[in-house]
Image: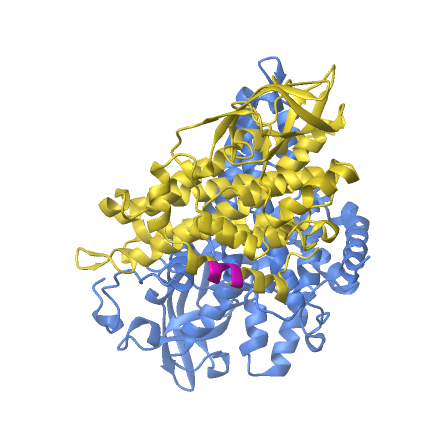
């Protein structure tokens, strides 16, 4: 048994041992507040057992292991429906960026330790009403104010902002230069005066994303995480992590085995639907796609193990997997016919086809819309031209609104 | 077996690409489309000279003792430049059947010639839509074969064929010499594949496997060939993606390169996705050649490679506009090959069934 296999079985055993306390059965019927409280205890349990910050430096409370152990643990963890979504963004992007770019090491260490133990949550304040895919078109302003800065503007689609203690934010510090060059990156205290968080109810019925308003929010210059005007590079570093962490070939929806189980259990014309060749075709096509993505991931992991840089094909994962999950979820609902109308807004996207279906569009937009990912493949990998951009090189305050 | 190519394997890819690009041109391939019974002899001579025919066969019989991964790398390059004959796959399948299931005498008789390329092999299982018929019409009685094998790739040139026939109350996997069979050339859209119907009338044959194991053996041979073909398809798809990209970086319309239009660049980016999924499945399948999940992995490789090549053929022509449909541009060479390879070693419907049977536990 390889070291990684040993790690996997040890992790699986631990996850199994905490499943009764934190798994999806324990979460059934909980209010969101109680579920969050359970989630904080789960995160603390992970920390105590050595499964938090798996590939983070030990000086920040991490385990000092590699990306391989992290992915291995997450693949096992995914099976049980634990209340870990509240920390997904926090520990995924903002806190690693804080470790990388934060200047005050004592402050950083304190924040990282609290975040790893579920005591504090961080959000990522990027998208705005006027700029999602076109991130550099954002309008939130940071103006100098004494020795510090004053924030004014609005962010949107901010996951878990309603529970966040801190956030990382990109704001415009100079409207007189082209849009990418006038941005600066800060962290901000979400409890500071002038910060207003308003949850947005999404299509599926839950409200994990928010609008966040900043009215004369004062922050010190020690909150700054990039050179003045150098914020776009740090924002790109943040987004690279976001795209890279997507390695679930099921597109964050149910495993294909669950579709096969459903097709076996469904009577269609007096026979199990699994005997219907249209259903079989979709299973075959999905399997081939998922096995290709899994093989790409496996190859990337071997390359990292060998100290090599994985190929750019890793960027396909989110693009390919979420679209196909969307279609397969539609088919799974179809398959149930008149039994397919049921819906529980609090169901789990990893084992409920209807929840998977209704939340799938979010996955195709968040962290880079499909179209942006295709642009990236076309431009960065294949060397095709950039789109026509009329605002290129134009000072931000001269771009027609 | 690793899914990361080592230095030796990378050298095989580089060298075979260099040789093929130097020796194969579309000007030589185009006339073959309108000729019957002809193949690109320079391609086959190159395959023999470079040792590709011997690559995946045992050293004891003149082979080089390498495996499916290495042969796949050659097939990938052959797919890029359009292989001029089907024998790389067909002879490999025939040789593997003899190596796995034949007697020492049969191996001694056939394998050295197949390894050197002097003997050409074919695999003739298909009857129309059935890549591996449940009840083959071909019969095997007293070491003689009767009936017709249809659409055999390489059938016009092969010296021997592996057949799947109905024996006395049980299926038989057998090897037949083709010296006396009636070969009817199929006027095809891809003539250098040398497709033929083979009419057996009391043709002498030797059984390799009889009884219920014969079908599993035949499927294994088909899966080995399917993985080689999948590499070839992926190579073809990759070449088309690059041709489309290069054209989009050259052709201008409405005052800009057409590659700047999202309808064009996203189409090509989607091809990149299909090619990489197919490649990953191919590498995975080649690395699983002697494991229980081989058939499943081969089916996944085959399905994704067929989809990649067919889609690349459609979209690459579309990106080219009018020039893409001319005889001279030659994109139709790939369009034709994408379809002929989609049928050889069993169509997608066949492999979908094979895959799902295994996933759902309906196949042992």
Q: Position of residue B148 (x, y in %)?
A: 55, 20
Q: Position of residue B174 (x, y in %)?
A: 69, 28
Q: Nearer the viewer, residue B335 or A237?
A: B335
Q: Nearer the viewer, residue A299 or B163?
A: B163
Report the chain shown in blue.
Answer: A
Magenta segment:
B15-19
Q: Nearer the viewer, residue B150 or B4?
A: B150
The single residue placed furthest to the front in the displayed view is B180
Total labels: the figure holds: 0
Q: Position of residue B106 (x, y in %)?
A: 74, 37
Residue beneath the point at 72% across and 53% down: B59
Which image quarter: residue B205? top right
Examine the rendering and report whether any part of residue B362 can be seen: no
Q: Give the color of chain B as drawn.
A: yellow
Examine the rendering and report whether any part of residue B62 can be seen: yes
The single residue placed furthest to the top in the displayed view is A270
Examine the residues drawn in magenta and state their main secondary structure. helix
Residue beneath the point at 65% across and 26% down: B164
Image quarter in which the C terminus of chain A is found: bottom left
Q: Is residue A219 magenta?
A: no
B215 horizontally vs A197: left or right: right
Residue beneath the point at 53% across and 49% down: B277
């Amino acid at each position: 048994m390889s070291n990684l296999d040993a790690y996997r079985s040890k992790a699986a055993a631990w996850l199994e041992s905490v499943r009764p306390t934190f798994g999806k059965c324990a979460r059934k019927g909980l209010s969101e507040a109680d579920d969050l409280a359970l989630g904080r205890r789960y995160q603390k349990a992970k920390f105590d057992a050595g499964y938090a910050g798996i590939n983070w430096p030990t000086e920040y409370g991490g385990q000092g292991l590699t990306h391989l152990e992290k992915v291995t643990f997450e693949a096992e963890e995914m099976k049980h429906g634990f209340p870990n979504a509240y920390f997904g963004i926090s520990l995924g992007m903002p806190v690693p960026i804080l470790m990388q770019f934060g200047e005050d090491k004592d402050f950083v260490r304190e924040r990282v330790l609290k975040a790893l133990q579920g005591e504090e949550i961080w959000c990522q304040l990027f998208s705005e009403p006027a700029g999602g895919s076109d991130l550099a078109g954002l309008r939130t302003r940071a103006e100098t104010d004494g020795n510090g800065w004053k924030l004014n503007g609005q962010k949107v689609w901010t996951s878990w902002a309603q529970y966040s203690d801190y956030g990382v934010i990109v704001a415009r510090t100079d409207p007189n230069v082209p849009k990418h060059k006038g941005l600066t990156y800060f962290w901000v205290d979400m409890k500071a005066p002038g910060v207003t968080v308003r949850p947005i109810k999404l299509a599926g019925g839950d409200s994990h994303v928010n609008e966040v308003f900043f009215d004369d929010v004062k922050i010190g210059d020690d909150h700054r995480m990039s050179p003045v005007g150098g914020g776009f590079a740090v924002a790109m570093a943040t987004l690279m992590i976001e795209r890279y962490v997507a390695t679930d070939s099921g597109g964050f929806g149910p495993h294909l085995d669950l579709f096969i189980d459903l097709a076996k259990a469904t009577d269609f014309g007096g026979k199990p639907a699994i005997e219907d060749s249209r259903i079989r075709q979709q299973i075959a096509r999905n399997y081939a796609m998922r096995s290709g993505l899994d093989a790409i991931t496996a190859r990337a992991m071997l390359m990292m193990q060998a100290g090599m840089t994985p190929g750019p094909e890793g960027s396909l994962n989110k693009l390919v997997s979420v679209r196909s999950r969307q279609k397969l979820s539609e088919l799974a609902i179809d398959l149930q016919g008149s039994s397919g109308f049921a819906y529980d807004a609090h169901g789990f996207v990893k084992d409920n086809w209807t929840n998977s279906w209704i939340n799938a569009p979010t996955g195709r937009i968040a962290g880079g819309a499909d179209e942006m990912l295709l642009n990236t493949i076309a431009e960065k990998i294949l060397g095709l031209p950039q789109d026509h951009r009329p605002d290129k090189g134009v000072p931000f305050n001269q771009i027609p609104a | 077996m690793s899914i990361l190519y080592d230095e030796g394997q990378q050298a095989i890819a580089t060298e075979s690409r260099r040789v093929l690009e130097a020796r194969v041109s579309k000007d030589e391939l185009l006339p073959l489309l309108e000729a019957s019974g002809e193949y690109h002899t320079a391609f086959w001579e190159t395959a023999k000279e470079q040792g590709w025919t011997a690559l995946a066969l045992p050293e004891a019989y003149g082979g080089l003792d390498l495996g499916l991964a290495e042969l796949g790398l050659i097939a990938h390059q052959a797919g890029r430049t359009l292989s001029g004959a089907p024998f790389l796959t067909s002879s490999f399948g025939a040789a593997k059947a003899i190596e796995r299931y034949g007697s020492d005498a049969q191996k001694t008789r056939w394998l050295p010639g197949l390894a050197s390329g002097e003997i050409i092999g074919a695999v003739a299982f298909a009857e129309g839509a059935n890549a591996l018929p449940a009840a083959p019409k071909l019969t095997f009685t007293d070491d003689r074969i009767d009936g017709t094998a249809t659409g055999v790739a390489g059938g016009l040139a092969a010296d021997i064929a592996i057949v799947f026939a109905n024996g006395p109350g049980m299926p038989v996997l057998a090897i037949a010499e083709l010296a006396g069979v009636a070969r009817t050339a199929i006027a095809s859209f891809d003539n250098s594949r040398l497709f033929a119907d083979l009419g057996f009338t009391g043709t002498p044959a030797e059984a390799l496997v009889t009884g219920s194991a014969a079908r599993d053996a035949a499927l294994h041979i088909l899966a080995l060939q399917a993985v080689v073909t999948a590499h070839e398809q992926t190579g073809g798809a990759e070449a088309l993606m690059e041709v489309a990209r290069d054209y989009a970086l050259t052709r201008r319309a409405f005052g800009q390169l057409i590659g700047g239009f999202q309808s064009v660049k996203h189409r090509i980016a989607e091809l990149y996705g299909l090619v990489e999924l197919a490649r990953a499945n191919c590498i995975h399948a080649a690395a699983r050649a002697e494991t229980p999940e081989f058939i499943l992995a081969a089916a996944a490789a085959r399905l994704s490679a067929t989809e990649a090549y067919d889609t690349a053929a459609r979209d690459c022509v579309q990106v080219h506009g009018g020039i893409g449909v001319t005889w001279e541009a030659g994109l139709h060479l790939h369009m034709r090959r994408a379809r002929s390879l989609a049928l050889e070693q069993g169509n997608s419907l066949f492999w979908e069934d094979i895959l799902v049977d295994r996933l759902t536990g309906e196949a042992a």
